[in-house]
Image: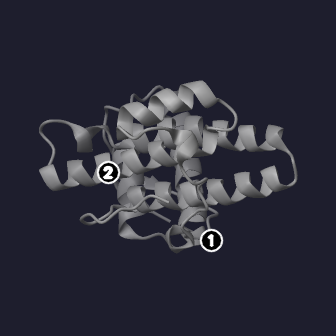
Amino acid sequence: DCDLKIGTLTILDKWILARLTDLVLEVTSSLEKFDSIVSLKLIEDFIIRDLSTWYIRRSRDRVSVYADEKDRNVSLSVMYGVLVTLSKLLAPFTPFITEEIFRNITNEESVHLQNYPKGDKSLLDEKLIEDMSSVRKIVELGHAKRKEFGIKVRQPLAELTVNNLQFTINKELKDLIKDELNVRKVSF
């Protein structure tokens, strides 16, 4: 439901849009079963773990004044689309705050006059969602090991070796791991 007609999306942009689509489909399914508790937990998990803790934190440098203008515009457009869709998704649960958020970011009349999101299945990429989950687990374990050995993240390391992992990873995901853990090389 994010209408993006913009430049090149990064792997992070594609992932957040895939996760958003997955969220819309899961929330809709839960609501069709009259299970609002599960719907709200799914939305909360998405906002805290995926949007705030991973996407926005990983995109900070992309939206700075020093960032490439095209990349900044892509990132901001993706964030805008996610926030608009989230406000529509949350409208039945929190009508007043979503109304305020929606009107402030879109200048449209009301979120309650909008169609409920259906989820753009063309943005859904299950493999990317799974791969990003593995990347996040690797990063989490890498941070834990750094903490265990008392090595700060700002200190670069030569290599990270990941054992017991049976999946192939593309260069962009590998670069995310390298950047997040401040390592020069990642090998499996």
**Mark drawn on residue 182:** none
Residue bearing mark 1: 166
Count of all numbered marks drawn on residues in the image: 2
Residue 55 or residue 174, whichever sits in front: 55
Q: Say what amino acid the circle numbered 2 marks.
A: Ser
Is residue 170 visible to the viewer in this orientation of the structure?
yes
Type of amino acid under label 1: Gln
Q: Secondary structure at mark 1?
A: loop
Q: Which residue is at a point 33% across and 61% down the rendered structure image?
A: 10
| Mark 1 or mark 2: whose residue is earlier in sequence | 2
Q: Is residue 75 above or below residue 147?
A: below
Q: Single out the mark in the foreground, 1 or 2.
A: 2
Residue 138 at what x, y percent from top left? 55, 50
The residue closer to the viewer here, 151 or 52, is 52
Q: Quadrant of residue 106?
A: top left
Residue 164 sits in which quadrant?
bottom right
Disc 1 packing (10 Å; few <14; some 14–19; many ≥20) = few
Residue at 42% x, 29% y is 151
Residue at image position (39%, 53%) is 176
Estimate the spatial distance between the alpha carbons at disc 1 and disc 2, rounded to whole Å.
35 Å
Measured as percent of width and height from the top left, residue 168 is found at 52, 73
Q: Residues within 10 Å of mark 2 (few under 14, many from 20)?
A: some
x and y, in percent, of residue 163 in the image:
59, 60
- Seen from the viewer's position, the closer of residues 98 and 66 is 98
Give the secondary structure at mark 2. helix
Tell me the residue that label 2 is attached to.
77
Judging depth in this view, the residue of 96 and 184 nearest the camera is 96
For residue 169, above or below residue 27: below
How far across and how far down the image is residue 102, in percent?
Answer: 46, 36
User: Can you say whether 167 is above or below 29 in the image?
Assistant: below
In this rendering, the answer to whether 78 lies above or below 163 is above
